[in-house]
């Protein structure tokens, strides 16, 4: 018999801080309980929301069906050879805690992804990325429950179809797989650093003060940069970047760059990636408020809840931003977080 909690408040379980009430709620700490929950929802025809840290979700005030929060724990090395090792981490572990743990053990590779909120299990959903590293660069495989067959599977990085802020789990077969564990390829070699992003390189150099840059400098620099620029959800509600950075063709990039010389873009595959934050700021949105919600004053890509905001207000603000960016630049912004339901 499942111990469901009825009319459960999710106000503290979504980083926007929106008021949201789940019809039923349960915490999941084992694979057996996960299977039971999935069977219960399927036999009663109930929608099931798998919840991590709620940092990439925009919730409605009433959520019908069941909300199941992943809280399974565990971190272990499952193989090692020379400097290389594979670390298996349960979905319910905190993402940043896992990065801190890996650093404390001298396992490197996750340092560029420090201070991203949320859980390990949600990280493959949108292939989290920051400062030139994406989750896909470090994933060996992902362990999942297939809700169609009720089997536990291991999906290789290739199977997960990772791409920019996207994956099999987010857009190809949303809802089919529940992630139970993620296995990372990490290294004890402290010389394999990614310092592609200029601000990161500059901050690392300042921290290293002339000595060699280590993964610990990278970790500290990422934390420092993020604290300077991003709102802490514990203080001001937000879900990080609200829009993806749009991709355009070379021709389109050159047209825009000729008209707007300050445009920020980076060569990316066969085209260019534009900095969505720059487009939004150029339309005058930075720091603007609309009711109780607004655009963060230090980074225009982040929408914030100043206190009593709700999903409807965020939708209105996001739509106005999309329209103005499209009118001025002819570029369509795509929302990054998930609206539920
Ligand atoms: P939730 O918001 O709880 O869930 C997100 C989605 O994943 C939902 O669809 C949910 O159903 C699903 N899900 C959750 N757990 C599982 C599971 N075990 N199995 C299957 N599905 C699951 N993102 C980046 O990519 N890079 C960043 O640098 C970054 N910075 C951020 C900074 C701030 C201040 C904030 C608030 C957000 C930021 N984000 C960033 C977005 C967010 O933190 C990530 O997407 C994170 O991985 C979401 O984790 P979560 O546990 O909070 O997921
Ligand atoms: P930033 O460093 O000011 O850079 C602005 C944009 O330019 C970023 O979106 C980044 O793309 C791109 N960029 C900068 N240098 C680049 C390079 N050398 N090569 C390719 N692209 C480059 O960005 P920020 O707002 O301070 O964020 C820092 C990092 O944290 C970024 O990687 C960002 O994605 C990540 N972040 C993500 C979220 C989220 O919710 N998704 C929230 C906060 C921060 P990318 O975004 O593709 O990296």
Image (cartoon, rainbow, N blue to C red):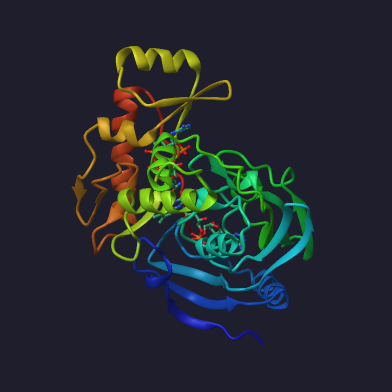
Residue 132 drawn above or below residue 8:
above
Can residue 149 be seen in the rendering of this structure?
no
On the image, the x and y values in percent for residue 166 come to 58, 43
> Where residue 41 appears, x then y in whole percent?
64, 71
Query: Observer-nearest residue: 289 or 327?
Result: 289
* Picture quadrant where residue 36 is located: bottom right
Work out whether residue 185 or residue 31 is closer to the camera in this orientation and state it: 185
Residue 325 x %, y %:
32, 30
Q: In this view, does 303 lie to the left or right of 164?
A: left
Residue drawn at 63 percent across, 73 percent down: 72
Quadrant in the picture for the N terminus: bottom right
Q: Can residue 201 be seen in this view?
A: yes
Q: Give 106 or 212, whichever is nearer the viewer.
A: 212
Q: Which residue is drawn at 20% across and 49% down?
A: 290
In the rendered image, the residue lying farthest to the front is: 211
Q: Is residue 278 above or below residue 135?
A: above
Q: Is residue 122 left or right of residue 331?
A: right
At 28% from the left and 31% from the top, the residue drawn is 324
Residue at 29% x, 64% y is 235
Residue 55 in percent (x, y) is at 44, 59
Position of 294 compared to 113: left or right? left
Q: In this view, does 271 lie above or below 235?
A: above
Q: How many labels does the image show?
A: 0
In the figure, residue 26 lies in which quadrant? bottom right
């Amino acid at each position: 018999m499942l111990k469901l909690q009825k009319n459960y408040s999710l106000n503290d379980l979504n980083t926007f801080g929106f008021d949201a009430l789940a019809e039923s709620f349960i915490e999941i700490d084992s694979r057996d309980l996960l299977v039971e929950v999935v069977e219960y929802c399927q036999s009663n025809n109930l929608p099931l929301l798998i919840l991590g840290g709620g940092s990439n979700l925009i919730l409605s005030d009433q959520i019908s069906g069941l909300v199941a929060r992943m809280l399974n724990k565990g971190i272990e090395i499952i193989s090692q050879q020379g400097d290389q090792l594979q670390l298996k981490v349960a979905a319910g572990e905190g993402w940043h805690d896992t990065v801190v743990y890996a650093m404390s053990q001298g396992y490197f590779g996750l340092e560029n992804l420090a201070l991203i909120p949320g859980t390990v299990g949600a990280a493959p959903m949108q292939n989290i990325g920051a400062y030139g590293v994406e989750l896909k660069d470090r994933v060996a495989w992902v362990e999942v429950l297939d809700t169609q067959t009720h089997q536990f599977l291991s999906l290789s990085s290739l199977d997960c179809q990772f791409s920019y802020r996207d994956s099999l789990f987010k857009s190809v077969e949303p809802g089919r797989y529940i992630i139970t564990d993620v296995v990372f390829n990490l290294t004890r070699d402290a010389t394999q650093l990614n310092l592609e992003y200029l601000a990161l390189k500059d901050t690392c150099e300042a921290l290293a003060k002339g000595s060699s840059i280590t993964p610990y400098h990278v970790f500290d620099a990422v934390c420092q940069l993020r604290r300077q620029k991003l709102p802490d959800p514990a203080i001001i509600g937000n879900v990080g970047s609200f829009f993806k950075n749009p991709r355009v063709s070379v021709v389109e990039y050159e047209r825009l760059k000729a008209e707007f010389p300050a445009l920020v873009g980076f060569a990316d595959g066969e085209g260019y990636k534009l900095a969505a934050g720059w487009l939004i700021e150029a339309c005058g949105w930075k720091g603007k408020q609309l009711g109780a919600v607004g655009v963060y004053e230090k980074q225009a890509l982040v929408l914030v809840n100043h206190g009593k905001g709700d999903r409807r207000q965020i939708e209105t603000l996001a739509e106005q931003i999309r329209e103005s960016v499209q009118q001025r630049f002819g570029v369509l912004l795509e929302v990054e977080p998930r609206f539920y339901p």
